[in-house]
Image (spheres, grey):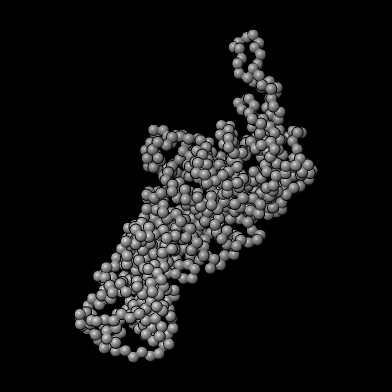
Amino acid sequence: MRACSENYAGTPLLIDTSPLDRSLQEMRPLRIEMVCGGGDEQLWDELVRRYHYLGYRKMVGCRLKYLVFHRDRPIAAVGWRAAALKVGVRDRFIGWSPSQRAQYLKQVANNNRFLIMPWVHVRCLASHLLSRMSRQLPRDWYAAYGQRLFLLETFVDGKRFRGTSYKAAGWVHVGQSRGYTKKGAGFVWHGEPKEVWLYAVDVGFRQKLGFVHREPSQWSPRLIQREGELAMMLRQVDWNPQLMPWMDIGVRDLEKVADELVSFHREFSRCYRRREQHRLGLAYLRGLMSSLERKTAEGIALLLLDPVSVRRLQDFITNYSWDHHGMLGAYQEALARLIAGPEDEGMLNVDSSEFVKKGTESVGVGRQYCGNLGKVENCQSGVFVGYASEGGYGLVDCQLFLPQHWFSEEYAERRAKCHIPQGLEFQTKVEIARQLIQRVKERGLFHPRWIGCDCTFGSSRAFLDEVGQDCWYFANVRSDTLVWTDQPQVQVPRYRGRGKRPTKPRVVSGPALTVTEIAGGPEVVWRWRKMADGAKGPVMAEVARLRVIPSRDGLPGKECWLVIRKYPNGELKYALSNAPKSISFRKLTRAATLRWPIEQCFQEGKEQLGMDHYEHRSWPGWHRHMVFVFLAQLFLLRLRYSFKKKSNVDPCPGAAVGRNGSGGRSNEQESRLADRQVPRLEKSYRLEVPLQDTPSSAEEAATEAAPVESTTVAASFIRSR
């Protein structure tokens, strides 16, 4: 059997248009004829062009056209084509997976045109023709294309028709489409959802093909319309220009970014329980990347939604029931696919970040040390874990720190108001960090070689002992940390005949020295390093390492590395590492730069993504807000790989760490080194530290003799304002 061709000669048609008002019984017999090629197909095209409200459009792919005749007079035209690629309610009704849809979609046909001539007024004619077509079409389709149809579909404009004819013919209404149409390689929202009707040619198709039936959701047409309106709004609202300095952004780029965001957010839609939550989540995520000065829920709702949605968006973050734990897990999986590898020599960083608050009602708020201000202040503090590797970097997990007084009876009512989980007990920041690291390792998504931390955690010997069991740590320590350069002699002091006989061993060979004293000693060999290319020239530092024995409650601990960095302004930084004695100097220097990506995540989050703009007071609200900040950073990292970056700029959240990569940020003190006269950096720069080991002692000696050596690790330093 010949399939339809598409050619219209445009010749005038002479047809009888006099009214035809009879009963269906009087109209019989009716002849349904497939018209493919020749004059009858041209007649079909012209009738549809003139009398169908959608007009005639060329059909592509598989298609069949039918004319219905009463005697020799055409009274109806029916068109069928290949099924739509994606229809949510249809796909749920069928119950197929994406791979099954790709395999069996060709066995579904779409009724894209159904026209009863305007001069024909015959009761029940439409349902009669649909019933006959459902029997004839499968035979003709198999003869033309070799595919056995198991389902028919159609889309009805609910503003014009109620679908009564389809219902009478045994079709099933399963819901509405979302209001998108295929355009080019993507989909465009047209704002007119259609009613979706289906007819099962083979009622046992699910069992035969292995599908699982799912009841379709009945979504409100108004909700679908508002979701589409939001998707269009995302194209028009300004983006924060500092988020994408590596792009030459044009109008088409912004539209593409907006479409990418919609697709990106859809990956996490399974974590929502209602369709409205999907819309609110998309708005919140987009709002964090907007040019709003204060990215609060109220500001985002007024910018992207409407005044009525202000309270809804606030409740969405604090009270609505949806799975933010599942969203965090899905985020970690997506981040790991992008930046983690089985043998990537990455670093799992732990650090705390504070958020200044003026009130006293927010969860966990209290007077405590604020790292941002360098003093005790009224603030909240969170413990964060991040990951950095050659593939990139990003935050992985977090937990809000609750001061101990929050667990007193006096705070019982406030804990209930803030929805703090029952059974939660006080934990120090170090204990929270150990729990977060353990949680990340148990998931098995990231495979760190290193554990990095600042002085808060590096001062805990128990913490270092635990994380050092299966990883190398690079822990910043305070300047008064005590160490020995040689193994001290330990023994139980001799009894002198008076008082209690000593039983505990003590160091008898000499006192330990502070790392500051070590840095000024003659045994330290300094090596110049070009640590970065700053705005005003290269950032230089002297770096030294030596084996030391840390003091543990006055007794020697295990031998480890002491790494000291001395900058031109005289500032010194100290770190301890349990890396093996054979590790190269360059690899230790690289570990120092891997520490800073988590700091950059904090700076980017607070300066550009509203990480500290939240006004949520509850425990769930704080953690949900942080999850959306994580998602925003991941989205920007994906964009960096999707869009061609400028050759001379290296600065997106999560840029690659390692050779030819970027990532990390120095703290404010290290940032000053770009220019002694300028307190903060004026533009982006990169750290570079070579990844190759230098196992040869001769090679190490040559390196040591060099006055200046360029490094390669890379760390992207964002603009400071």
The residue depicted at 70 percent of the width and 22 percent of the height is 509
Q: Is residue 651 left or right of residue 301?
A: right
Residue 385 in the image, given as x and y percentages of width and height: 53, 44
Residue 622 in the image, given as x and y percentages of width and height: 45, 46
The image shows residue 225, relative to residue 34, as above or below, that is above
Q: Quadrant of residue 565?
A: top right
Which one is nearer the viewer's eye here, 430 or 364? 430
Residue 644 in the image, given as x and y percentages of width and height: 60, 62
Which one is nearer the viewer's eye here, 318 or 156? 156
Q: Is residue 228 left or right of residue 429?
A: left
Quadrant where the N terminus lies?
bottom left
The image shows residue 86, relative to residue 401, as above or below, that is below
Look at the image and tell me whether residue 597 can be seen. no
The residue depicted at 47 percent of the width and 48 percent of the height is 329
The residue depicted at 38 percent of the width and 90 percent of the height is 12
* Residue found farthest to the top: 497
Q: Is residue 400 left or right of residue 206?
A: right
The image shows residue 208, relative to residue 143, as above or below, that is above
The residue depicted at 37 percent of the width and 81 percent of the height is 35
How many labels were placed on the picture? 0
Q: Is residue 95 left or right of residue 473?
A: left
Look at the image and tell me whether residue 143 can be seen. yes
Residue 585 in the image, given as x and y percentages of width and height: 71, 41
